[in-house]
Amino acid sequence: MQTIDRVEDLETLYGDPVPTSLTKVTDRMTPRYRQWIEAARFVVVSTVGPEGADGSPRGDDGPVVRIVDDKTLWLPDWRGNNRIDTLRNIMRDGRISLMFMVPGSNNVVRVNGRAVLTADTEVTASFDRKGIHPKSVIVVTLDEMYYQCAKAIMRSGLWTRGDDSEKVPTAGQFVKERDQDFDGETDDATYPEYAKTRMW
C-alpha cells in the first residue's frame, strides 16, 4: 500500500478548503455557540499523552459543561471506572478537543483548547447533586470553536435509523470474552440498577 508522506501531496489531493470551513471558526464563545453548548448533554473528550491518544464520552442530564466566560468551560468529572486515562493525559499534556452533540441535530460543535484539572472544593461543590460532588473538574481554555459539517451524521443516519443495540455485544459479553470466569449475564442484568446509584 502506498502512503501519503508529504503534507503538500495531501493538500494537492484534496484541493482548497471550503471557504465557510474557515470563516465559521471563532476564538471565543459567541451567542449562537453558547446556545448550542448549553443544549448539549453529551460530549466526546479527546486528549493525548505519552501512551497515545484517548477519546472519552461524557454525559449529563443537563448541559454537559458549564460556560464560565467566553473563553472558559468547566467539565465535572463524575463517577466512572477510575481508569482516569483522560485526566492522566491532561496532567502531562494540556491539549484537549471536545465534540458536542445534540440529539436530532446533524451538526456537531468542536472546541479545541488547553485544559488543567482542579479539585478546588468551591469549584467541585458548585456542581452539587444531593450532596455528591465530582472529585475534580476539567477547566478548558478555549482556543477555537466551530461547527462540523453535517454529512457524517447524515451518512450514518445516527438519529433516524433506529435502535441497533441488538446487533452488538453487551458490556458483560465484552468482559466475558477476556475473562471466561466472569458472569456477564448477571452483570448485564444488574448493571442498570447499579448505575442508577452512581450517576453522579
Image (cartoon, rainbow, N blue to C red):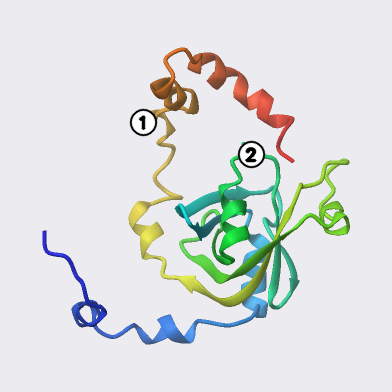
Q: Local crowd at mark 2 within 10 Å, few (<14), some, or many (≥20)?
A: few
Q: CA distance from mark 2 to mark 1?
A: 28 Å
Q: Quadrant of residue 197?
A: top right
Residue 52: image quadrant is bottom left
Q: Residue at x 39, y 22 (%)?
A: 177
Identify which residue is drawn at 19% across, 79% down. 9
Mark 2 or 1, closer to the camera: 2
Residue found at x 64% / y 81%: 28
Residue at label 2? 82
Up the image or down, 92 lies above or below 114; here it is above
Residue name at image x 74 percent, y 41 percent: 200
Q: Seen in the image, is 156 located left or right of residue 70?
A: left
Q: Which of the numbered marks, if any, corresponds to residue 167? A: 1
Asked if residue 159 is positioned above or below residue 96 in the image, the reply reads above
Against 142, is 187 above or below?
above
Using the image as rendered, state which of residue 34 and residue 74 is in the foreground. 74
Looking at the picture, which amino acid does disc 1 mark?
Lys
